[in-house]
Amino acid sequence: RAALYAHENGFDVIATTNATSRWKDAKQVDDSGQRAASRYEGLHYWAYDWQSDEMTLRKYQISAENRFYKQEYCGCSYSLRDSNDWRKANGIPKIQIGGDTAGLGERYFSDPLTDAAEESQDVVDEFFAQANEIADAGADRAERKKALEMYKSRRKNEKDDGVVNGLNNW
């Protein structure tokens, strides 16, 4: 619809913010944008590598400056399910939808360096590698449980007073 709107209103370039997150497949997003633009003569899709360390940090600087809402998953039911499976395996509270509190971390962006670190390429790559192992286990509960064993050593550390000290990985 963006390409059609651009064409009908005299724009010659379209772009998207969907590829700013390392959690998204930039090639898939860019391919879709290029296909949409190719339907209209003179319309171009602007592809840019938004997933560099510099752009990731800049995105979080803008988000913190404007106190943007921090959604804890992409918004689809599959992401909610898979993220909560991962959190359960890591001893992390479930995703909280809406409200003033988050299941993990802050509800609003506030610290660009911390927020950018949560989206480092290493974190994203490791998450998807582990998610693929769990997906490969399929519906077999025993196999899924075995695949989730990889998270055992990553549970929250607690100080002597019982206050959460942090996570071993994310």
Image (cartoon, rainbow, N blue to C red):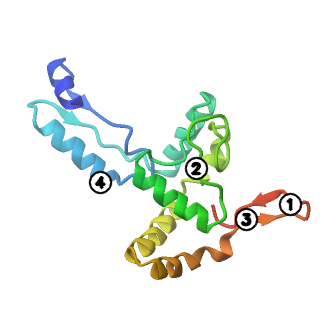
Callout 1: SS = loop
The amino acid beneath tag 4 is Lys
3 or 2: tag closer to the N-terminus: 2
**Which badge, 1 or 2, comes first in the chain's sequence?**
2
- Residue bearing the label numbered 4: 27
Q: Are marks 3 and 2 in contact (CB under 8 Å)?
A: no
Between 66 and 72, the one nearer to me in the picture: 72
Q: Quadrant of the C terminus?
A: bottom right
Q: CA distance from mark 3 to mark 2?
A: 16 Å
Q: Quadrant of residue 50?
A: top left
* Badge 3 element: loop
Binning the other alpha carbons within 10 Å of mark 4 as few (below 14), some (14 to 19) or many (20 upward) gives few
Three-letter amino acid code at the position of disc 1:
Gly
Give the Cα distance between marks 4 and 2. Answer: 28 Å
Measured in 3D between alpha carbons, the distance from the residue under mark 4 to the one under mark 3, in whole angstroms, is: 35 Å
The answer to whether the residues at label 3 and label 1 have Cβ atoms under 8 Å apart is no
Name the residue located 67 percent from the left edge and 37 percent from the top edge.
110
Q: Nearer the viewer, mark 3 or mark 2?
A: 2
The amino acid type of the residue labelled 2 equals: Ile
**Three-letter code for the amino acid on which mark 3 is drawn:** Lys
Q: Which residue is mark 1?
A: 162
Indicate whether 107 appears above or below 25: above
**Do the residues under discs 1 and 2 have CB atoms within 8 angstroms?**
no
Which residue is at 52% across, 51% downward? 53
Q: State the residue position of label 2.
A: 95
At mark 2, the secondary structure is loop
Q: How many numbered badges does the structure rendering display? A: 4
Label 3 belongs to which residue? 156
